[in-house]
Image (cartoon, grey):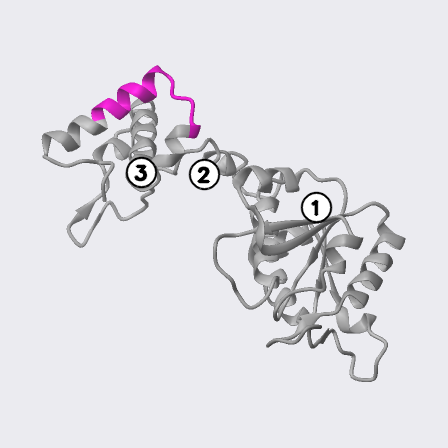
């Protein structure tokens, strides 16, 4: 993956990009993370990247010109690019989109907005994809951009220590993940399920599948609408619902 981030706060990118898995991905040559300070693309003495909005109103608006100049510079060295803008007005970010970004051969350019927004001419002049992390607003686009990069880079072959790890995570097949346990087997009176230390791999597989379905039914039942259920899944769901109805509970209600 090749990622360029346009920002007025490059230190934010550096703080995350030099740690943990993102650093490992760069060290292994699987991720290129380049930060572009938009102030370097300004022409006024104050290196201003924002100004007051036409028509009045509170707040400031990010100027289009520094963004245009930065994009032109990236295109000059990288050729065709894909431009992404973290925005609450965009399409919802998802596992599927993360997987798509991990396979993108063009450099991904993230415009990290701030203040009241970005000059609308950025949208009309450039081919920009707006992507939302959810129905809320935060102070800037740096953290959403880094989150999207983190979610995507996990799918790059060779990054994770266990090549099967990313294949069994939540949302990979529209189901939530099953519970995980590690040593010690007993802690504060709580014990690990016997099946996980039984050595019976088929029983463990079935338990994990059932618990994955249980977690999804309890926490995100809407995901079951998108998941094609096989015969075993339907049987396990019947067992789960029987467990709750026998106890006088409705698993579909919190």
Side of 93 relative to 50 (left or right) = left
C-alpha span from label 1 to label 3: 32 Å
Pick the front one: 25 or 148: 148
The residue that label 1 is drawn on is: 1
Side of 17 relative to 165 (left or right) = right
Q: What stretch of residues is rendered in magenta?
A: 226-239
User: What residue do we see at 25% from left, 36% from top?
Assistant: 252
The residue that label 3 is drawn on is: 215
Ranked by sequence position, the earlier of labels 1 and 3 is 1
The residue that label 2 is drawn on is: 169
Ranked by sequence position, the earlier of labels 1 and 2 is 1
Main secondary structure found in the magenta portion = helix
User: What residue do we see at 86% from left, 47% from top?
Assistant: 79
Q: In this view, does 150 lie above or below 213?
A: below
User: What residue do we see at 82% from left, 74% from top?
Assistant: 42
Count neighbours of disc 1 (C-alpha within 10 A) and say few if under 14, some if 14 to 19, many if 20 or more. Answer: many
Count neighbours of disc 2 (C-alpha within 10 A) and say few if under 14, some if 14 to 19, many if 20 or more. Answer: some
Count neighbours of disc 3 (C-alpha within 10 A) and say few if under 14, some if 14 to 19, many if 20 or more. Answer: some
Mark 3 vs mark 2: in front: 3
The residue positioned farthest toward the right in the image shown: 76
Instruction: Report if the CB atoms under discs 1 and 2 are less than 8 Å apart.
Output: no
User: What residue do we see at 62% from left, 53% from top?
Assistant: 24
Question: Please, what secondary structure does the residue beneath circle 1 have?
Answer: loop
Residue 227 falls within the magenta-colored stretch: yes
Pick the front one: 183 or 190: 190
C-alpha span from label 1 to label 2: 21 Å
Q: Where is residue 52 in the image (x, y as percent from the top left)?
A: 69, 77
Q: In this view, does 212 lie above or below 64?
A: above
């Amino acid at each position: 993956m090749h990622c360029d981030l346009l920002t007025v706060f490059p230190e934010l990118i550096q703080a995350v990009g030099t740690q943990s898995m993102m650093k490992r991905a760069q060290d292994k040559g699987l991720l290129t993370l380049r930060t572009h300070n938009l102030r370097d693309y300004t022409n006024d003495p104050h290196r201003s990247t924002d100004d007051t909005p036409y028509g009045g109103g509170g707040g400031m608006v990010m100027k289009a010109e520094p963004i245009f100049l930065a994009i032109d510079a990236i295109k000059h060295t990288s050729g065709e690019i894909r431009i992404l803008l973290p925005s609450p007005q965009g399409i919802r970010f998802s596992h599927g989109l993360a997987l798509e970004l991990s396979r993108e051969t063009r450099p991904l350019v993230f415009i990290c907005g701030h203040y009241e927004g970005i000059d609308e001419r950025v949208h009309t002049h450039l081919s920009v994809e707006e992507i939302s992390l959810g129905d809320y607003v935060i102070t800037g686009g740096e953290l959403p951009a880094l989150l999207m990069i983190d979610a995507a880079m996990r799918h790059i072959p060779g990054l994770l220590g266990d090549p099967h790890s990313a294949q069994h995570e939540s949302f990979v097949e529209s189901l939530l993940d099953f519970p995980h346990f590690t040593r010690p087997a007993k802690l504060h009176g709580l014990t690990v399920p016997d099946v996980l230390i039984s050595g019976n791999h088929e029983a463990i597989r079935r338990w994990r599948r059932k618990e994955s379905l249980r977690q999804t039914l309890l926490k995100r039942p809407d995901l079951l609408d998108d998941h094609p259920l096989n015969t075993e899944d339907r049987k396990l769901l019947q067992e789960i619902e029987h467990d709750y109805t026998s106890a006088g509970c409705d698993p579909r209600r919190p």
